[in-house]
Image (tube, helix red, strand yellow):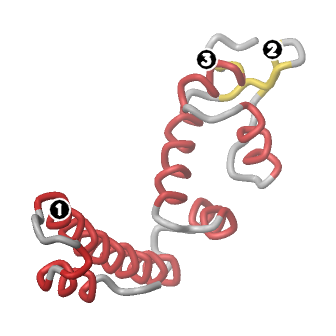
Amino acid sequence: MDDTLIDIGEVARQSGLAASALRFYERKGLIQAEGRNGLRRAYRPETLERLALISCARDAGFSLSEIGEFLRAGPSDERLRARMAAKEREVSERVDQLTRLRDSLRHAVVCTHDPLVECPEFKQAVRRVPRG
């Protein structure tokens, strides 16, 4: 095996992903094995950076199909930039929703009103949390 390659077990350990997830990502064309160490796939060290990018994009709500498109897109792909801008707006809206929910929960923790559900401030806080 080439000394610059990392076997699938080590990539799994360093990335925090299961080896089965790595094989799945490979089938989807998101990563590529560069060789083998016996029967085990081996990857370039850069694969760890790519996996971090994939995880970040998944956390942002992108599908694997969208992630694949992004990984293949050129730097001047305007559709890519538009989709990222739309996703940024979605994430910002979700952060705002979660912030309002957190504020409601913070009030619930310190509220002495009995019962809590009758507390006017808590009711107002709950109304500010959008339903999805």
Of 117 and 73, which appears nearest the observer?
A: 117
Give the answer, above or below, for where 109 lies relative to 6.
below
The image quarter containing residue 117 is bottom left
Quarter holding the N terminus is top right
**Can you tell which mark lies on residue 106?**
1
Callout 2: helix, strand or loop?
A: strand
Q: Residue at x 78, y 46 (%)?
A: 24
Residue, disc 3: 4
Residue, disc 2: 37
**Can you tell which mark lies on residue 115?**
none
Crowdedness of circle 2 by 10 Å Cα count: few (<14), some, many (20+)?
A: few
Give the answer, above or below, for where 6 lies relative to 58.
above
28 displayed left or right of 129:
right
**Amino acid under disc 2:** Asn
16 displayed left or right of 115:
right
For the image, the number of numbered tags is: 3
Q: Position of residue 40 (x, y in %)?
A: 82, 20
The image quarter containing residue 46 is top right
Callout 3: helix, strand or loop?
A: loop
Crowdedness of circle 3 by 10 Å Cα count: few (<14), some, many (20+)?
A: few
Label pair 2/1, CB-CB below 8 angstroms: no
Q: Residue at x 44, y 75 (%)?
A: 84
Crowdedness of circle 1 by 10 Å Cα count: few (<14), some, many (20+)?
A: few
Between the residue at mark 2 and the residue at mark 1, the CA separation in whole angstroms equals 53 Å
Between the residue at mark 1 and the residue at mark 3, the CA separation in whole angstroms equals 50 Å
Of 49 and 15, which appears nearest the observer?
A: 15
Q: Position of residue 73 (x, y in %)?
A: 58, 68
